[in-house]
Image (tube, rainbow, N blue to C red):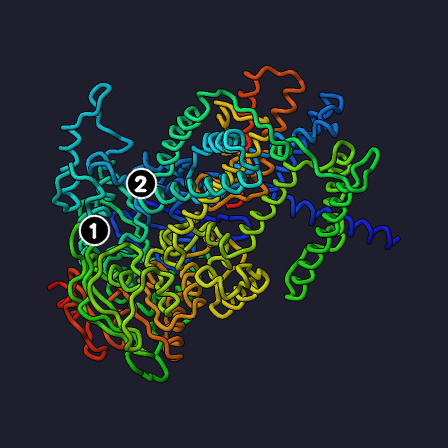
Amino acid sequence: MEDYILEMRNISKEFPGVKALDNVNFKVKRGEIHCLVGENGAGKSTLMKILSGVYPFGTYEGDIILNGEKQKFTKIADSERAEIAIIAQELALIPEMTVYDNIFLGHEITKGPTIDENKTIQKANEVLQKVGLKINPSVLIKDLGVGAQQLIEIAKALSKNVKLLILDEPTAALNEIDSRNLLQIIRELKQQGVTSIMISHKLKEVISIADTITVLRDGKTICSMDATQNTINESDIIKYMVGREIDNVYPRREKKEIGDISLEIKNWSAYDPKLGREILHNISINVRKGEIVGISGLMGAGRTELALSIFGNPRGYKINGELYLNGRPVSFGHTSKALEAGICYVSEDRKGEGLILIQDIKSNITLANLRALASYGVINENEEVKVANEYKSSFNIKTPSVEQIVGNLSGGNQQKVSLCRSLFARPKILILDEPTRGIDVGAKYEIYTIMNRLVAEGMSIIMISSDLLEVIGMSDRIYVMAEGKVTGEIRAEDATEERIMEVATI
Amino acid sequence: MTEPENLRTKENDLLKELVYLLRRNIREYGMYIALVFIITAFAIITNGVFISPRNISTLIDQTGYIIVLAIGMTLIIVCRYIDLSVGFLAGFLGAVAAIFMTRYGMSEWIVIPIILVFGLMVGLINGFMVGKLSIPAYVVSLAGMFIFRGLLLMVTQKTGTIIVPNKGFNDIGNGFIPDPFRGKNVHILTLIIGGIAILAFIYTSIRGRQNKLKYQFEVISTPLYIIKLVFVSIIIAYISWILAGYNGLSWTAVICLVVVMIYHFVTQKTTLGRHIYAVGGNGNAAELAGISVKKITYIIFASMGMLSALSGILFTSRLKSATTTAGTLFELDAIASAFIGGASANGGVGKITGSVVGALVMMSLTSGMNLMGVDISYQYVIRGGVLVAAVFFDVMTRKKRG
């Protein structure tokens, strides 16, 4: 008989109008790394929220059995007491506080009525060592990179003596090196007896790290697979996730007609007055009509900064260099001017910079080009709804109505709304910043198909992506950036992951 | 046998739709319901004095200078800013107007536009400091509060209260529109305006509905639609009737109606309005959608400055004089009105009509409690309680839907 640390039996959970979980069974062996995969909206996060007490006992049906005992968590503190910790997608660290303060936030080490700083620092050092982070615990969180912050979240969990660690897409915001590092730490924790449940969309890393893989689809458990024998491949998982086979993750473009250069920058440098240093050095790149140009590189290589400096410079950099549009020199004083010239930028940060979450779908879609719907500044609202409905059906946005609030949509659908907004502005050059981050395989495929359709119509696409396979699979040409410089240009047919990483880590 | 059953299900459907609409828009209707409740309660307690034509007319004139401030403040709050300087700015500009008319003998018809432009420019400077120099609005407007209070004292110190003799100016806050038909007991022009308002309302809403039908969009069912038309028409008719029974429509009411209509239209129907809500909802996203956050900041602060000037004019005219303390705490009434009216401190949410109702709620409370002879100390406590209760209701309904 197997030793299960956790069993979730016949879990069902309903939200108004949706059955999020339908009789889900989920078993985790002691000391394993168990990966939970599924499309957005499959119910992974809901299941983990039930386990960690975010959705209290009584709001769902079914049983949670931990170490053989039935549990009734009514709040997060209950699950913490049972030595379960969840690390959410959005990090819950306080930027202005030190590392050690963050690690022991909520369970401070005290001496009488005061906080014992020395002991706190000492203990912080111990847990930091466990996660392989060699930093001074007195630095502020805001001075650390995302990778280090993610590790500190884990350290925070370890400081509470967790036995069961839940990680919700821990590598979504990390670059290759940080991701590898993080996965290694999870493996080491396994050696120390910590059981981990990891939700991830990155199937490659799932295969490499998982002992067991459970697939959820539409709120149901589809299967649980033993992954220790290295017999599972990506297409197996995808098949279970989407319920059909996707033979190629990156859809092939029927015909490629690459035309003249549409956008070109030469000797492009940018100085960030807030940081007080130059962030882009002497960059020269171009993109042609009907071409997808990928921009690869590690986090912090300056990719987003490059995109924004071209797109009307909303962050106020001091720019040196030449920008040509269809051979003519241009410069944009504001994003609105770039939009008028036919350049559009879709942000990597959907929630922070992309969408207006409290507004409905139609207002979000039409925002960048309201002029097209207005006469003398008065908006034709009926026409707006009509336009939004057209986008809704042609982009397959899954929602009952375009008057739905965008904040209620899943990540993939939000990304589509973001994309629709840009397309409604009728761009000729589209800059996509991490267009498929945090969205599921099915939605990714749809977005790739849309991209292919757009370039077939003669648009130019610049795609920034941290996903090497995506860059290689989708681009005609790839620029690699490192430390604010373009360190290499690689043609699609010559591109391999190794080749890109080599140039990206110069 | 079948017929009455049919009828019953029809009635049920209507009721269901009504309940559904109420539930979906509970936040918006909640305020109207609260206002009606407050008015009814005071009407009963004061044996009808509260809803007497005279009191209603006075109430509107007293609320006017808060309504215009609340309208400007709504846009400021929607964009996640705050403006604390509006009260003393209104007071100061009112005093400047009084000085122009008394000391320099300028005509009120020249003074009023000058003061409005002054307000606009002060607002632009505030907007510049917030938008361009990135000083927090809280700090800029707090500084403005000190500065305008000082300036108000400076210009009124020597003379004390400045009495304004200009009849035309004083009529803005105290006078009524003329009645060319010379009705004996009723103000006929007011009734005619009420009638026109009803016709215009019915016309625009029918046209809107037809347009929607043309696009084959969903509309509310015909019986409910007719009920809504009749209901609103009755309210307009009733208010016009009450006002016509006294002295008719006051100039303050006319000015407020015009300002409300303009701002409501701009915020709800135009690209500028959409841009303001976008900046409030997510400034970064708005910027990337080609909207200049700076420009919007200038616009809303300039509008706030101009409305402060208008408020100052209304208040000075109402008192027929400028005093050393004019405008004290106006900003708090305006902010409270906006929040009661459903504006959210998180930005992106808040309607002009909501804030107007909010202002009416606040001033109805004051007026009603005054009639009842409630001590001013209790009045403040009660108004504070209502503010918190209203926002609590707002937060709760928002949570439910989100």
Question: Residue at horizontal 30%, vertical 49%?
Answer: A167
- Which one is in front in this view, the residue at disc 2 or the one at disc 1? 1
- Residue kind at label 1, given as amino acid type: Pro
Classify residue A309 as left or right of residue B372: left
The subunit carrying tag 1 is A
Upstream in the sequence, badge 2 or badge 1?
2
What is the CA distance from the residue labelled 2 to the residue labelled 1? 44 Å
The local secondary structure at tag 1 comes to loop
Residue A91 screen position, x and y as percent = 30, 45
The crowding category of the residue bearing disc 2, from other C-alpha atoms within 10 Å (few below 14, some 14 to 19, many at least 20), is many
**In which quadrant of the rendered view does residue A306 lie?**
bottom left
Task: State the quadrant of the C terminus of chain A.
Answer: bottom left
Q: Which residue is mark 2?
A: A84
**In which quadrant of the rendered view does residue A177 lie?**
bottom left
The local secondary structure at tag 2 comes to strand
Count of numbered tags: 2
Residue A441 screen position, x and y as percent = 37, 65
The answer to whether residue A497 of the structure is visible from this angle is no
The crowding category of the residue bearing disc 1, from other C-alpha atoms within 10 Å (few below 14, some 14 to 19, many at least 20), is few
Q: Which residue is mark 1?
A: A273
